[in-house]
Image: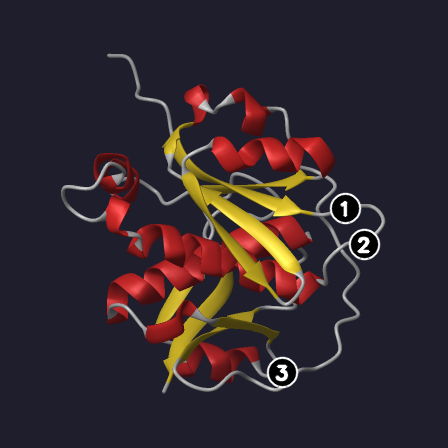
Amino acid sequence: MTEEPAWAMQLALRIEKAAPPSHLAICEAAAMAVVRLLTDPRSAPGGEWHDAVAAWESRRIRKVARRARGARWEALAALPGVLADHDGALARAFVPGPVTEVPPEISKLQVGGTDLPRDDEPKPPPEPPYALVTVDPGVAMTTGKIAAQCGHAAQLLLRARGEWPGLRVRVVEADDWGRSVAEADVAVRDGGFTEVAPGTMTAVARLIF
């Protein structure tokens, strides 16, 4: 029997050499892009994206974050997906599909080169409601990997709790990982395709009212 190819949602992070976004802002933008695609009317039953989204969610919800800049970023606008513009960071989430059928505009983007300095200044949280995604700082991951984990966390929270107004996400690193896990509504355990071992708990999330 021929095994079906894995499916993934592709994420594109705009990381320009001259003016890269901040680490946390791009992670938040990626998570917001994921939720916006999932709550887009085109992903609802009867919508043009619904079958692909449903087929992907019936499998492991794999995401692949890639770096895009310049003309290659601009070329992505024509592909089916959504854009999140947040705090100086731009991220696109695309309609999921088999990893063997990634459009060339996406497949030629680098998966590597997504790491950014972790020198973000602390910012006040947004007005509730919003999703609080907490990342385990004890797990070594690149910015791109963390962005994908934040997308997973936001997706799991959305499906567990339903839609929330504004689709806002705040990403922080845990001061007390044990307490963050205990307070969480959902937890992400990585599939182990890249960077971390299978089953590693990388992020948790809860809805702040």
Query: x, y (%) of residue 45?
Result: 15, 46
Q: Give percent across and percent down for residue 176.
A: 58, 83
Q: Is residue 189 visible?
A: no
Q: Which residue position holds label 1? A: 16
Question: At x 43% / y 72%, what residue is drawn?
Answer: 205
Residue picked out by circle 3? 175
Which callout, 1 or 3, points at the residue further toward the start of the chain? 1
Frontmost of labels 2 and 3 is: 2
Left or right: 28 in relation to 42: right
Q: Earlier in the sequence, mark 2 or mark 3?
A: 2
Q: CA distance from mark 1 to mark 2?
A: 5 Å
Q: Secondary structure at mark 3?
A: loop
Return the residue nearer the eye: 126 or 184.
Answer: 126
Asked if residue 68 can be seen in this view, the reply is yes
Residue occupied by mark 2: 19
Question: Which color scheme does this rendered protein use?
Answer: secondary structure
